[in-house]
Image (cartoon, rainbow, N blue to C red):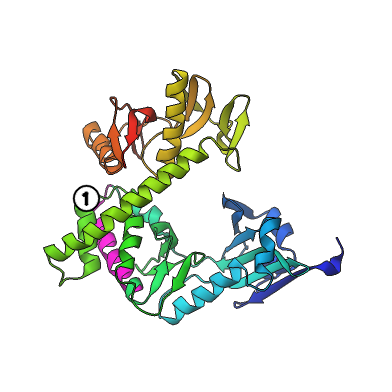
Amino acid sequence: MARSETSLRWWVDGERTPRLEALLAEPERVLAGPGSVARESAGRKRFYRLDAGGEPALYVKVFSLPAAARWRYFLRPSKARRERDVARRIAALGLDVARPVAVGEVRRRGLLERSFAVSRDVGARDLRAVLEGLRERTAERRELLERFAAFARKLHDLGVDQDDFSPNNFLLRPDGAFVLIDFERARVRRGPLGERGFRQLAKLHRRDFGVTRTERLRFLRSYLGPGAGRAERRAAWQKIWPEFRRIRSRDARRAAAAALSEGRNLAREGAGWVVRARAGAKTLRLELGAEESLRCWVRAHQLERLGLPALRPVRLDGARVELLDPGTALPRQPADQVIGRALAALAPYGRFNSPPHWRFTAHGALLANPQAFEFVD
């Protein structure tokens, strides 16, 4: 490949620290080197945490494009540049955002091959992790959820449309302030979202953080404001619930299809399947009939996709299915209470066609026979 055919261009908004300068000069080499940790990967998107010595850590999101899609960006900015622009617009509304300090594009003959979005650690915690850690501290969790509900209403009134509305796209500062991250699927509309905001609450509702039905209703009350009465809350819930059911069904269908499709996460192993990242993990083996093992395999993928309390799939081999062994821990509360929370998380999605079996871990009870659960539209 001729050097002149490929170009790397950066747009830098933040301070040019030594670690950032090294990344700007040779991004692929730095990301493959020491101090770089691959945090997650989804499709053609990769995410890294880059230690920077005495500097705040850098987070680098890398978007790659297949050859067939590169022509679409011949005259269009990359996803990374779009993230920067959306983050600027949100920050201009007076909201706290972890916006990119640098974005870059690699193009060959004008066609975009990949792009980079770089942000700095802002010293805040992932809201999802905070909520998970407050499972046993009910009063603190409720107070945080109510503040998050009021913040979500503020976002929606300002026209911030975060399509992937989930607590893992928000951070919490030590002083309790919320910080927005991940603007890939966000946009700023000209006015309040109105009923469109209920769609985002439906997406939030599908996540399980040990939040009870009562707490969800309190969340909705805080979102609607102190002037909303019972009739308004009931009307809002009647708009949220059908959207939640639609999202739930879509996610379950996608997970079922992915459970039998070779790709980044799943590989063929003879006549069976294996989850690539768990190939060497310790497992629990279930010897079932061929049809039941297949049902167990698919159901485990669906439950994982939806973030529900069940053992995760590892391998399918004919009549045998292997699930990830999470270890064993005695519940810190009576077993029936721990199981009750798991049942409450599963209840909105379906029902059991046979008695459930449970595995106790430090984080609660996990369904040990996923094939016993049946999704209901």
- Please identify the residue farthest to the left as the structure is shown: 230
| Magenta stretch: includes residue 175 | no
Residue 154 drawn at (x, y percent) = 32, 73
Q: How many marks?
A: 1
Residue 235 drawn at (x, y percent) = 19, 62
Quarter assignment of residue 178: bottom left
Q: Which residues are magenta?
A: 136-155
Compared with 164, 290 (above or below) is above
Q: Residue at x 20, y 64 (%)?
A: 221
Q: Residue at x 56, y 38 (%)?
A: 261
Residue 4 in sight = yes
Q: Quadrant of the C terminus?
A: top left
Residue 238 drawn at (x, y percent) = 22, 57
Is 350 on the left or on the right of 17, as rendered? left
| Magenta stretch: includes residue 143 | yes
Quarter assignment of residue 115: bottom right
Q: Nearer the viewer, residue 136 or 188?
A: 188
Task: Tell me the chief SS of the magenta region.
Answer: helix
Q: Quadrant of the N terminus?
A: bottom right
Q: Which residue in the structure is indicated by mark 1? A: 213
